[in-house]
């Protein structure tokens, strides 16, 4: 494969995958040096360590989620980032919250800035949805799981964030209460959440 063919293959992959990582080139025997050359030519742009996107890719919350998903394939988008995905709260494409397994090594991601939440056992693996964003499969906690996680991490993110999210979700969304209480028990926040749910739900 000559240099032109390699460059064309890389650009095709970048558009197909949404976010290109150097390891994606390995099966084709293409050196990572070609990524730098395409960046120099203005055909790709590098966003943080080892993440390359087409030059015309628009920076957005969706692209930030896709970059994190490719950089941390075993992670799950959580807390405020998951809340924003479910259209509650504000987007912040410069900072993404991601859950990792409790014993996993802390991932190294330059862009976007990541906030790591460590979870273990069922609290980590349950409630995960997979969504296609910027051609990337992104693992995100469901709305109900996200609401309970906000209460679980309320001392780190602020209890008002959890309460405001719960109020908005119950008022505007079709929250599955069975799932909400299942995850509340899983995350051991059932007793903390119950007074707020009782106060917010019409009797």
Image (spheres, grey):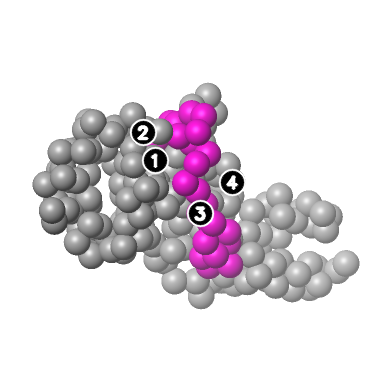
Quadrant in the rendering for residue 90 = bottom left
In this rendering, position of residue 85 left or right of residue 151:
right
Q: Within the magenta stretch, is there residue 147?
A: no
Q: Give the foreground label among 1 and 4.
A: 1
Chief secondary structure of the magenta span?
Answer: strand
> Label 1 near label 2: C-beta < 8 Å?
yes
Q: Residues within 10 Å of mark 3 (few under 14, many from 20)?
A: some
User: Disc 4 marks which residue?
Assistant: 73
Does the rendering let one see residue 34? Answer: yes
Measure the alpha-carbon separation of dots 1 and 4.
26 Å
Q: Which residues are magenta?
A: 114-139
Q: Earlier in the sequence, mark 3 or mark 1?
A: 3
Q: Residue at x 35, y 55 (%)?
A: 176
Q: Earlier in the sequence, mark 4 or mark 3?
A: 4
Measure the alpha-carbon separation of dots 2 and 4.
27 Å
Q: Residue at x 76, y 69 (%)?
A: 9
> Along the line of sight, which residue is nearer the eye, 120 or 195?
195
Q: Give the foreground label among 2 and 4.
A: 2
Q: Position of residue 21 (x, y in %)?
A: 64, 54
């Amino acid at each position: 494969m000559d240099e032109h063919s390699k460059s064309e293959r890389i650009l095709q992959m970048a558009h197909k995958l949404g976010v290109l990582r150097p390891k994606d080139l390995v099966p084709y025997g293409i050196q990572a040096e070609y990524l730098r050359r395409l960046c120099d030519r203005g055909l790709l742009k590098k966003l943080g360590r080892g993440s390359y996107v087409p030059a015309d890719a628009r920076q957005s919350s969706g692209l930030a989620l896709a970059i994190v998903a490719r950089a941390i394939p075993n992670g799950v988008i959580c807390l405020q980032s998951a809340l924003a995905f479910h259209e509650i709260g504000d987007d912040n494409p410069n900072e993404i919250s991601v859950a990792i397994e409790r014993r996993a090594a802390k991932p190294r991601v330059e862009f976007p800035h990541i906030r790591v939440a460590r979870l273990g056992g069922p609290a980590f693996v349950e409630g995960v949805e997979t969504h296609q964003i910027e051609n990337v499969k992104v693992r995100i906690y469901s709305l109900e799981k996200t609401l309970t996680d906000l209460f679980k991490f309320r001392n780190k993110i602020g209890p008002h964030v959890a309460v405001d999210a719960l109020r908005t979700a119950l008022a505007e969304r079709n929250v599955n209460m069975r799932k909400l209480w299942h995850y509340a028990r899983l995350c051991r926040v059932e007793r903390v959440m119950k007074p707020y749910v009782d106060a917010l739900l019409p009797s």
